[in-house]
Amino acid sequence: MLDYVELEADLGQEERMVRDTAREFVEEHVKPDIGGHFEAGTFPKELIPEMGELGFYAPNLDGYGLPNLSETAYGLLMQELEACDSGLRSMASVQGALVMYPIHAYGSEEQKDEWLPDLGEGKAVGCFGLTEPEHGSNPSRMETYAEKEGDEYVLNGSKTWITNSPIADVAVVWARDRSDDDTPVRGFLVETERDGVTTNKIDEKLSLRASITGEIGLQNVTIPEENVLPGVSGMKGPLSCLTQARYGIAWGAIGAARDCFETARQYATDREQFGGPIARFQLQQDKLAEMATQITTSQLLAHRLADLKERGDLRPQHVSMAKRNNVRMARDQARVAREMLGGNGITTDYSPMRHMANMETVYTYEGTHDIHTLVLGQDLTGIAAFE
Ligand code: FAD
């Protein structure tokens, strides 16, 4: 596996173990069927508890049976999962960073006890409802709202593009709380079996096909007051979760690119044209050299982010830079790898075109490439260019 500047040498024992466990799991249990799942537009749901048993959900959190691994170990895990498929990494990202993290950071003790062990073990599935049909890049304009009636809240609105909503037991729904004059955004734990909740599946995807995506409809959904996340109010709530998930994406995208590189390198060595392997042509070597360089520089950025996160110095803007750079890198390099595979490259027999299609989602979700550009622009100039 590509590790051109020997980053492995600095990994601790636990980090190597996590990486190897994930790599082995993916090789044995997911890779053989992932092309089929992508074609069929299905997610291997039977793996959800298995991934839980292996500790793949929020392993960088502590308590409630969670292993409290290093941020590097967590990143390496995301890298290995996405080397298989972005859908697999999305499962772990949503469950861990977007559902367990807010409960862990902002939930009551009762909420933590009720949900964290089951979510961690994959006995329950969660989803994160922020995006709405009319509000994607600017979720602060969300229209979903909650109104207090006695000791209950009544929720109305709709969310879309929600990973795992059709199979989720619980949704972390971000909505405006109209019982407060400032109508702050708050997090609500909504069990999907409640009356008035619908979770229609979105079927027409040409990207991230091995992942289940849906809507969340909320029509006069009543939840007890105890289901509100008490520890946060305002956009800081959802945005802080996104920073966690984007950190994992910055690592994960490298995995997809690495898998494209390894596939292309192998193919170029095996495939013969004009009397020998295509790897002997300078044009092909240029592609491999560029791919390896881009992957390596993205790895360095990810490792640096892990150090900053570990010592508490990671800013959301650092994560924006890494998500923006590493996903663009993976998107570009997947296309180059696909190209090197010729006609075979357009099939699901090989991974690059699947990764390439997946990267269109990864480039768009968790803040589009453009939005992260504006985040950096604001950080570098002090001027916000969003509106
Ligand atoms: P828009 O915001 O309408 O953007 C359209 C285009 O305009 C983009 O190119 C964008 O970059 C550009 N643009 C917008 N504003 C500006 C600006 N100010 N300056 C310059 N350009 C701009 N959301 C969830 O809440 N939970 C999930 O689990 C989830 N999973 C997803 C899974 C998939 C497969 C996909 C595709 C999306 C998922 N999303 C999820 C939603 C995702 O986060 C949004 O699609 C994303 O934030 C972009 O919003 P949008 O699609 O409405 O695009």
Image (spheres, rainbow, N blue to C red):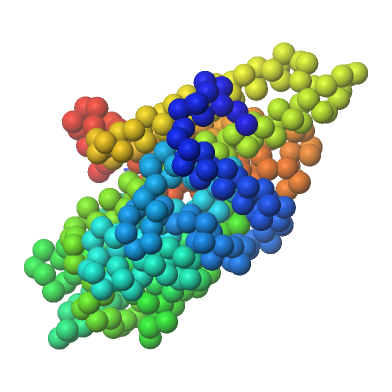
Q: Tell me the residue at 61%/51% (across/down).
A: 25
Q: From this viewpoint, is residue 116 visible?
A: yes
Name the side, left or right, on which 163 lies relative to 354: left
Name the side, left or right, on which 108 lies relative to 81: left
Q: Tell me the residue at 44%/74% (across/down).
A: 169
Placement of the N terminus among the 4 image quadrants = top right
Residue occupying the far front of the picture: 13
Q: Tell me the residue at 48%/66% (across/down).
A: 122
Residue occupying the far left of the picture: 181
Query: Total of numbered circles in the picture?
Result: 0
Q: Position of residue 115 (x, y in %)?
A: 36, 70
Whether residue 66 is situated above or below residue 166 in the rendered picture: above
Q: Position of residue 130 (x, y in %)?
A: 34, 60
Q: Position of residue 331 (x, y in %)?
A: 55, 36
Q: Nearer the viewer, residue 254 or 384?
A: 254
Q: Tell me the residue at 65%/54% (across/down).
A: 30
Determine which quarter of the picture holds residue 246: top left
Name the side, left or right, on which 214 lies relative to 113: right
